[in-house]
C-alpha cells in the first residue's frame, strides 16, 4: 500500500473525518471503553490482548471477553459508589487485570489514573491525595508500598490469597469482580470531560496533574494510523509501560481504538525478553523508547548472523535517535525506524509519519506537525523563527483542532503565551515545517526514556537526616541517554562515605521510584547558586558533561 502525500493530506485534513470513525460524537460525548472494545465485538474471535507472563506462559483475550470483564468491573465500581468523574488507580504490572481495571473504569465514566509499579510510597501518596483517588487495585508484590501512604484509598487485591497475612481481610479482585453481571451500558461523557488523570514531572515543586479529555482519542487515532502506520493486519507491540503516558496512550488506548491486537509483556524490559517477544508473536509493528533500541543494539550478539524478524515498521519517542541506532535497526531488525515527538500534556504532536510520504526524513529530527496540529518555534519575543534558527517549540492552538490539553489540573503552572502552548523544548527550524530537538529550556532529565523532574529527586533526598542540600542533573550516558546524578551537601556529623551514598540511593528508590534514583552521588561542600539563592543547575550539568568528556 503506497503512502499518501503528507502535505496534501495535512492541508486537507478535517476533524470530522476522524470523528466519523467513532461511535460517539464531539457534540454528544464519548465512552472510551466503548470506542476501544464494543466497536469490535461483532467478530467473537477477534483478539484484543495477547499477554506474556513472567514465567513465559501466554494468554489471549478477545474483545468480547474484555467487554464482559470491563462490564463486571464497572458494576463492582457502581456497587462501591464509584462512578462518573471518580479517579480509580491500578498499581499493577502489564497484566490482563490491569487492562480490565482501565476498561471498566472508563466504561462507568470514571477517570483512570496510572501508578507506575516502581513508584515509592511518597510518589503514590502525592498522586492519590491530589486526585482524591477512590480506589487502588494492586497485587501482593506491590501492596506493601501502600502501607506508608497517608490517606490511602480503598484497596482491591489481585490474587489476595497470595498476600501476607496482614492483608487477609482485604477484598479479592476475582471474587469481588467476576461474580458481577456482564451487562453494563457504557456511560458517555462530554468531549471536554476527563478519562485519564496523568501526572508529569516539572523542575519546580511537585509533579503536575494532566486530566486528559475524551476528545483526545481523535488525536490518538491519527497518531496510530498515520505516524505509527498501523494497519488491520499488524501485530503491534508498544514496549512502553502503561504507567506512563506513551504506554497508556499508545500501547493501550491507541491500538484498540483501531481494532488491533495489542501485546503485554509482564516481565521488565530486557534485550532477551524483547527478542523473544518479537520472535514468538511475529511482531510486525514496534514502538519503543530510544533506550530500548540502544540496549537491543548493545546486545546484538544474541541474534543469529542471518536472523530475520517479521517487523515492517518501528517507531521511537522520548528523545532523538542517533544515526548508529537507525542504521542498526534497518540492518538487524529489518525495518525503518521513525522519530516521534510528544508530551504527556499534548500527546504526540510532531512525527516522521510512516503512512504519509514526507518531503524529507532527517536523521534525529522530530519531523513535521501531526495532522490536526500546527507546531512552530518561537524566539524570546514569541515570534516564529526563520529557517536555521532555534526557538522554543510551541503549538499554535487556533490552528490545531486536535490539540486537547486544557491546562494543568490544579493550575500548577501557566503553560500558554497568547495563542501558543509552550512545550519548554528548544528546537531547530528547518524552514519546511519540520524541526529537530536541541534541548530543554528547563531541567527535565530524560533517562532511559523516562522524564524525571530533578526537584522531585532533590526533595526526596532532603527527607534524609544527613542531607542539607542537593542539586540533581542529567549526566550523559551512552545507553540511557542520561543518568541521574546528585550533588549532595551533607550536614555536620555525617561522613561522605560510599555507605552513605548507597543509603541515599536506597532512600530515593523506596520513597520516589526505582527509575528516578541517582545512579551517581557526589558529595560537595556547596552548590552553585544565583544571587537570589536558586541552584544553578546549568553549572552542575556542565560539570557532569565535563566529567564524561574527561573520561
Image: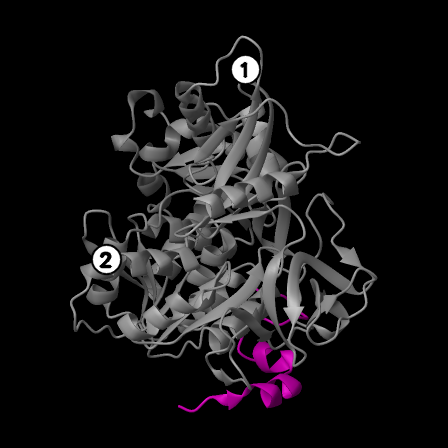
Q: Quadrant of residue 272?
A: bottom left
Q: Which residue matches tag 1?
A: 465
Q: Look at the picture and state if 409 lies above or below 357.
A: above
- Crowding at label 1, few (<14), some or many (≥20) Cα neighbours within 10 Å? few
User: Residue 179 lies in magenta, yes or no?
Assistant: no
Q: Quadrant of residue 411?
A: top right
* Residue 292, horizontal then vertical, whole percent: 37, 57
Q: Which residue matches tag 2?
A: 59
* Residue 106, horizontal then vertical, whole percent: 51, 55
User: Which quadrant is the C terminus positioned in?
Assistant: top left
* Residue 286, horizontal then vertical, whole percent: 36, 68
* Residue 57, horizontal then vertical, whole percent: 18, 53
Between 322 and 399, the residue placed more toward the observer is 322
Q: Residue at x 39, y 53 (%)?
A: 99
| Marking on residue 349 | none
Q: Look at the picture and state if 177 lies above or below 63.
A: above
User: Which quadrant is the N terminus positioned in?
Assistant: bottom left
- Could you give the CA–CA distance between mark 1 and mark 2, rounded to whole angstroms? 48 Å
Between 84 and 152, the residue placed more toward the observer is 152
Amino acid at each position: 500500500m503506497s503512502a499518501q502525500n503528507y502535505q496534501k493530506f495535512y492541508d486537507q485534513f478535517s476533524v470530522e473525518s476522524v470523528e466519523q470513525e467513532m461511535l460517539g460524537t464531539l457534540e454528544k460525548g464519548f465512552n472510551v471503553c466503548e470506542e476501544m472494545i464494543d466497536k469490535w465485538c461483532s467478530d467473537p474471535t477477534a483478539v484484543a490482548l495477547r499477554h506474556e507472563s513472567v514465567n513465559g506462559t501466554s494468554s489471549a483475550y478477545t474483545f468480547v471477553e474484555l467487554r464482559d470483564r470491563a462490564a463486571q468491573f464497572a458494576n463492582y465500581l457502581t456497587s462501591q459508589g464509584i462512578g462518573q468523574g471518580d479517579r480509580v488507580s491500578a498499581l499493577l504490572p502489564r497484566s490482563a487485570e490491569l487492562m480490565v481495571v482501565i476498561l471498566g473504569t472508563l466504561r462507568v465514566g470514571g477517570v483512570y489514573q496510572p501508578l507506575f509499579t516502581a513508584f515509592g510510597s511518597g510518589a503514590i501518596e502525592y498522586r492519590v491525595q491530589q486526585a482524591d483517588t477512590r480506589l487502588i487495585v494492586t497485587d501482593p508484590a506491590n501492596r506493601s508500598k501502600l502501607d506508608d501512604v497517608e490517606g490511602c484509598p480503598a484497596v482491591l487485591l489481585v490474587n489476595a490469597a497470595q498476600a501476607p497475612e496482614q492483608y487477609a481481610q482485604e477484598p479479592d479482585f476475582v471474587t469481588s469482580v467476576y461474580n458481577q453481571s456482564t451487562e453494563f451500558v457504557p456511560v458517555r461523557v462530554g468531549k471536554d470531560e476527563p478519562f485519564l488523570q496523568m501526572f508529569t514531572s516539572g523542575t519546580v515543586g511537585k509533579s503536575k496533574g494532566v486530566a486528559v479529555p475524551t476528545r483526545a482519542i481523535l488525536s490518538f487515532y491519527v497518531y496510530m494510523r498515520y505516524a505509527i502506520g498501523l494497519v488491520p493486519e499488524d501485530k503491534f507491540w508498544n514496549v512502553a509501560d502503561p504507567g506512563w503516558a506513551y504506554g497508556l496512550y499508545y500501547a493501550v488506548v491507541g491500538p484498540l481504538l483501531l481494532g488491533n491486537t495489542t501485546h503485554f509483556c509482564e516481565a521488565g524490559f530486557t534485550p532477551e525478553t524483547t527478542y523473544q517477544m518479537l520472535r514468538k508473536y511475529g511482531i510486525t509493528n514496534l514502538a519503543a523508547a530510544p533506550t530500548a533500541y540502544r540496549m537491543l543494539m548493545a546486545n546484538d550478539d544474541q541474534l543469529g548472523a542471518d536472523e530475520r524478524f517479521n517487523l515492517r515498521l518501528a517507531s521511537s519517542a522520548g528523545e532523538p535517535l542517533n544515526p548508529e541506532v537507525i542504521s542498526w535497526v534497518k540492518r538487524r531488525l529489518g525495518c525503518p525506524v521513525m522519530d516521534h515527538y510528544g508530551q504527556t500534556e499534548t500527546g504526540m504532536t510532531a512525527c516522521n509519519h510512516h503512512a504519509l510520504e514526507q518531503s524529507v526524513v532527517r536523521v534525529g529530527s522530530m519531523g513535521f506537525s501531526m495532522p490536526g496540529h500546527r507546531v512552530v518555534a518561537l524566539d524570546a519575543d514569541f515570534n516564529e523563527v526563520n529557517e536555521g534558527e532555534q526557538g522554543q517549540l510551541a503549538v499554535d492552538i487556533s490552528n490545531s483542532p486536535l490539540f486537547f490539553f486544557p491546562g494543568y489540573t490544579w493550575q500548577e503552572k501557566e503553560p500558554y503565551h497568547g495563542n501558543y502552548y509552550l512545550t519548554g523544548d528548544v528546537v531547530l527550524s528547518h524552514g519546511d515545517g519540520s524541526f529537530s530537538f536541541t534541548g530543554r529550556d528547563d531541567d527535565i532529565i530524560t533517562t532511559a526514556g523516562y522524564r524525571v523532574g530533578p526537584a522531585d529527586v532533590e526533595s526526596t533526598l532532603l527527607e534524609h537526616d544527613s542531607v542539607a542540600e542537593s542539586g540533581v542533573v542529567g549526566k550523559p550516558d551512552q545507553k540511557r541517554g542520561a543518568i541521574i546524578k546528585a550533588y549532595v551537601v551533607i550536614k555536620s556529623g555525617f561522613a561522605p562515605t560510599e555507605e552513605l551514598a548507597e543509603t541515599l540511593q536506597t532512600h530515593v528508590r523506596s520513597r520516589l521510584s526505582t527509575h528516578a534514583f541517582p545512579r551517581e552521588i557526589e558529595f560537595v561542600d556547596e552548590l552553585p547558586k544565583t544571587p537570589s539563592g536558586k541552584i544553578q543547575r546549568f553549572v552542575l550539568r556542565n560539570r557532569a558533561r565535563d566529567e564524561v568528556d574527561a573520561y
